[in-house]
Image (spheres, helix red, strand yellow):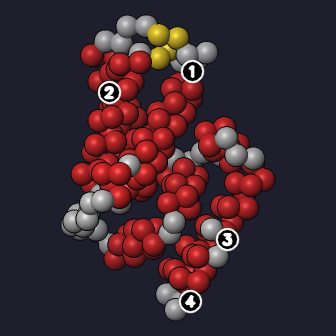
């Protein structure tokens, strides 16, 4: 169980070095903006420092950071400020055209599909781990993962009817 204790700046630095990239990638996959992902990154580690949680294992610490990142990204997207702003697209170069097309295809997916694919493929979490993080049933997540893969594949193939595929089952 989580307990409160003193968090030192050195410990925070170590945790940020170890998990910072993971937190940032997940935030970016949800928000599609570097500046917004930076904000979430800062909020997650500020919360870590302020709450000073104690964990049973490194897996528990990792799961806590993922859960807080998901929650902060969801809160950010549903905030009144976010809904009433117009986003300026961040410009970033991709080393290979395949990376750009995959990023564009991921951006075209609904946020819940992006999150699921990101956790499964980029963070290499099992369906069981994702179920624990999200509070959903494993069977539901397997179905959602299959649908998200299908949508992504349709977009990557460049089929004209991908919009109908994306809006299906939302």
Upstream in the sequence, badge 3 or badge 2? Answer: 2
Upstream in the sequence, badge 3 or badge 4? Answer: 4
Please tell me whether mark 1 or mark 4 is closer to you in this view.
Answer: 4
Q: Secondary structure at mark 3?
A: loop
Upstream in the sequence, badge 3 or badge 1? Answer: 1
**Residue situated in front as seen by the camera: 95 or 115:** 115
Q: Secondary structure at mark 4?
A: loop
Upstream in the sequence, badge 1 or badge 4? Answer: 1
At which x and y percent is residue 73?
42, 47
Q: CA distance from mark 1 to mark 4?
A: 46 Å
Please tell me whether mark 3 or mark 2 is closer to you in this view.
Answer: 3
| Quarter that holds the N terminus | top right
Check the image and name the residue furthest to the bottom. 160
Residue at 37 percent across and 26 percent down: it is 47
In this view of the protein, can residue 26 be seen by the observer?
no
Q: Secondary structure at mark 2?
A: helix
Return the residue at label 4. 161
Return the residue at label 3. 169
User: Quick check: marks 2 and 4 in contact, CB under 8 Å?
Assistant: no
Q: Secondary structure at mark 1?
A: loop
In this view of the protein, can residue 96 be seen by the observer?
yes
Q: CA distance from mark 3 to mark 2?
A: 37 Å
At which x and y percent is residue 90?
23, 63
Upstream in the sequence, badge 2 or badge 4? Answer: 2
Return the residue at label 2. 46
**Other-residue count near label 4 (Cα within 10 Å), few / some / many at <14 / 14–19 / ≥20:** few
User: Quick check: marks 1 and 2 in contact, CB under 8 Å?
Assistant: no
Please tell me whether mark 1 or mark 2 is closer to you in this view.
Answer: 2
At which x and y percent is residue 164?
59, 83
């Amino acid at each position: 169980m989580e307990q409160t204790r003193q968090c030192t700046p050195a410990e925070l630095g170590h945790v940020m070095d170890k998990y910072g990239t993971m937190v940032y990638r997940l935030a970016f996959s949800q928000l599609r903006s570097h500046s917004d992902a930076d904000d979430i990154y800062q909020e997650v580690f500020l919360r870590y420092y302020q709450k000073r949680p104690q964990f049973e294992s490194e897996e528990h610490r990792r799961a806590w950071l993922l859960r807080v990142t998901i929650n902060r990204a969801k809160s950010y997207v549903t905030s009144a400020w976010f809904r009433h702003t117009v986003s300026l697209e961040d410009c970033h170069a991709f080393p290979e055209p395949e990376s750009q097309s995959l990023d564009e295809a991921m951006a075209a997916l609904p946020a819940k599909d992006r999150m699921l694919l990101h956790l499964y493929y980029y963070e290499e979490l099992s369906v069981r781990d994702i179920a624990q993080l999200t509070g959903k049933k494993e069977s539901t997540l397997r179905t959602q993962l299959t649908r998200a893969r299908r949508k992504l594949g349709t977009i990557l193939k460049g089929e004209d009817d991908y919009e109908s595929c994306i809006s299906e089952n939302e």
